[in-house]
Amino acid sequence: MTPDAAEVVIGTGEAVAFWILGPVALAGALGMVFSRNAVHSALWLVTTMLSLGVFYVIQSAPFLGAAQIIVYTGAIMILFLFVLMLVGRDSSDSVVETLRGQRVAAAVLGVGFAALVGAGVARATEGLAVIGLGDAGGDGNVTAIAELLYTRYVLAFEATGALLIVAAVGALVYTQIERHPGSRRGQKQLSRARFLTDDRPQTLPGPGVYARANSVAAPALLPDGRPSAETVATGVEAQQVEQMPRPTGREQLGSPDAALGTMDPAPLDGPAGDRR
Amino acid sequence: MTPAYYLVLAAILFTIGAVGVLVRRNAIVVFMCVELMLNAVNLTLITFARTTGTVDGQIMALFVMVVAAAEVVVGLAIIMSIYRTRRSASVDDANLLKY
Amino acid sequence: MPAEGLLAASWLLIALPLAGAAVLLLGGRRTDRWGHLLGTATVVAAFVLAVACTVQLAGLEERSADVELFTFISSGQLDVTAGLLYDPLSAIFALLITGVGSLIHVYSIGYMAHDPARRRFFAYLNLFVAAMLLLVLGNSFVALYVGWEGVGLASYLLIAFWYTRPAAATAAKKAFIMNRVGDVGLAIAIFVMFAQLGTTSYAGVFGSVGTLAGGTITAIGLLLLLGACGKSGQFPLQAWLPDAMEGPTPVSALIHAATMVTAGVYLIARSAPIYDLTPTARAVVLAIGALTLLIGAIAGCAYDDIKKVLAYSTVSQIGYMFLAVGLGPAGYVAGLAHLLAHGFFKAGLFLGAGSVMHAMNDGVDMRRFGALWRKLPVTFGTFGLGYLALIGFPFLSGYFTKDAIIEAALDRDDVWGWVLGGVAVLGAGLTAFYMTRLMLMTFFGRARWEDGVHPHESPSVMTAPMVVLAVGSVFSGALLVSVFPLSGWLEPVFGEPAEAAHVVAPALIGLVVTVVMLLGVLAAWLFVGRREVPVTAPARVSPVTRAARNALYADAVNESLFMRPGQWLTRALVWLDNRGVDGAVNGLAAGLGGTSSRLARTQTGFVRSYALGMLGGAVLVAGALLAVTSG
């Protein structure tokens, strides 16, 4: 590096930051590519982006650093996560590569590309003087950007505004589920549909939780003594739990007949299974 | 320590992103890799802005960010609608564009 | 000299039948009731006109009349004027065509009375008469060619008149195709004339043909001969004529006996100035005539189909005429006289055969005839006179004309003269044999009729023409040779007949021919008349008989020499086309297609593959940039 008048010497602090954050950014990038879970990938990417945001700030671009962290890491990556949750949360990639030679070719080409571009850039910028932005890279950064943005680049700025609008409308159009007018069913149709099916129209019977056991996994018993699968909540495996014994005879129940009058007890002793 | 370090880092990040596009099949992850490539380019732009002492590079980076935002919105919408019709977010499942 | 008076209207000769054909063909069913009468009337009117024209022609000093009609083709150097030449040669043909044609039209009224398509028949007959008159009256080879093709067309239409019969349709095709072979020769001859002489009119060609090289003249002569052979059923194109008998019998009588098949003789006689210059071609004419004479006579001995026997007889008799015209100036008149006489007796014989078939429920197998002379007295009488005329019974027409030909052959006074004369005499014996056999099988012996056949004499509308033709058969020979000599009439065409030094006295020739003829008759009596005729042809026969039954294997020869190689050639060409030409084209297309589809395999549809390609491209660009900037 040749000493020059306007030259800015890169300090040790920056070098330290680079050598700490640079590997972090690299690790984040590699982690994103290599983690099978998409959510993990997103988090690894966030790491990289944060590191880059710090780099921006270090490199006299505080506004862009903030934008990187707020807009990119904050907004866009959250959008990614939303979509992930919607569609691909549980779809982790399979390890098997279906395209023959794709991975090898990608690795070879990637290494080659990195080597070529890196070497080229390194050679081209060797001994390049860093002029520095001065105040425009510090407190006056926003002002400096604004001055250029609203003068020389105002047309491009307006075009990007239009682009954003179009993109928003486009996203709406893409994700809208089209319904023909009148295709939405009202309460009457829904009710009729429910009652015309073979399924039970009423609510499912409650579990026998509080009747004889304290577990939600305890199914209610049918009058003949068999457990009813319908009474167990979905996601809970029905299992044998300790239950209070069921009164089975007149001796245990006492003799209600006397209190109730002249009811014939014969139906109570009917053969099991007749009820269904 | 020279700006070339940043540029080489950006090149490596860009390459990792590109390789990720090639090897990953989940469309959303592929998208993230594209974002990584864009970020690498931004780093390059900002480095050059600082090296040349003009803010124009930063403005370019800003535009890249805006365009990337728009691209993410539309791209994710496309992924959503593809997922809705094909129940899959794999880029290999959408392979009808062929001979 | 330009025609005047009635001769200037000689185009009406052609126009009348042509108009009749047009009316009948275009008029449709409306003309069904009177169509046959109109058709007959036009031909009879043409005959009357021809007689009047000929009488006027006889009164002219030059005895030749040119009728300029209109410019037919005018293109560059080719300038063909449609015109007629009415001279003694065309006059006798016009008389023959219209005269015999009229009689056969009259006969057809009765013969076709019960055919639902009688109108169409008369239309075709009229068309034929018109085309034939154009053939003989045209004043150029082009006009002759138009008529030539016209009669070919009419012949085709009439052979296939009962086109629902496969045999008839096949026979018509065969006739048409074999005629094409000859027509190609005629066409090329006309092309050569135009290319070498720049003209196709008779006057122009005959006036300047002497300036050509000898080889060219011989070529023209041989090509014309090829055309004549095709039309006249001469070797090697004789096979179509017997099959052509599938047509109605009046057609056989008019077209395939009396007129059309003699067109070849007319062509060679008309082209006499050409043949006078090329002894080679003339020798070929002689050879063909002699060969055909024998082939026809031998084949005629073996057939049982009455019409086929007559057809081979026609082939044989036209062989006589070719032999005669091949002899040169000495033979022209004899050949034409025989042609006219033959026109009478052969037409009469065919009409008689038609009458017999009429009586026998359209049967043609002579083995199922027999003893008909009592049932069909008029037919027997006229047929018998025609038979006697044909075999050359003394003082009937065939005797005079055939003797004249043999005389002319012997007058050559060399070895070939003796050979040709011998062939002609042998042919006369064979003729006597097969015709006697025909007479015996048809009219004499025991009745071998099929069940349900009740022979009856034909109506007078049919017998009257037969009587007229029989009278012609008896007297025409003497008339043409002695009383009203044809040689004198044809003098303007062929020149002064040289007073031949007879090698053998004509009387002696007549005696020899008569003896040979009687031997033939005797042989026929020994072979056929003496014993019972089996109803089915015996299967175990000598090889000679078998060969004769197959017409000396003419069809087999044609098949193996032309049809099979043609088929092989066609197949080879098809193979070459499929494998060679198509193969190259299809192979190129398939190669391109295969390469394309193999290239298309790289289009997997996987976006990651495409992205890989993009990255590869980016690497290449980066490398190239680096190489450029650093190098």
Image: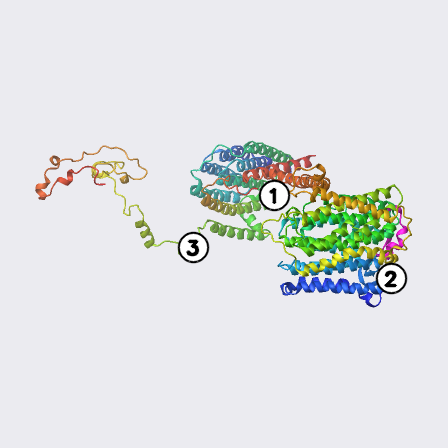
Identify which amino acid the numbered label 1 is placed on: Gly
Residue A160's spot in the image, x, y percent?
Answer: 54, 50
Number of labels in the image equals 3
Q: Main secondary structure of the magenta part?
A: helix
Which of C475 and C221 lies nearest the eye of the viewer? C475
Find disc 1 in the rendering and name its residue.
B53
For the residue marked with disc 2, what is the amino acid?
Arg
Q: Is residue C80 magenta?
A: no
Is residue C74 in sight in this rendering?
no
Q: Which residues are magenta?
A: C197-215
Q: Nearer the viewer, mark 1 or mark 3?
A: 3
Closer-to-camera residue (A228/C160): C160
Between residue A37 and residue A23, name the one nearer to us.
Answer: A37
Visible residue check, residue C393: yes
**What type is the residue that disc 3 sits on?**
His
| Circle 1 SS class | loop
- Residue A79 percent across, percent down from the top left: 46, 44
Residue ID for mark 3: A180
User: For the residue labelled by badge 2, is the local secondary structure a helix, a strand or a loop?
Assistant: loop
Which numbered circle lies on residue C63?
2
Q: Residues within 10 Å of mark 1 (few under 14, many from 20)?
A: many
Q: Marks 1 and 3: CB-CB under 8 Å?
A: no
Q: Quadrant of residue C612?
A: top right
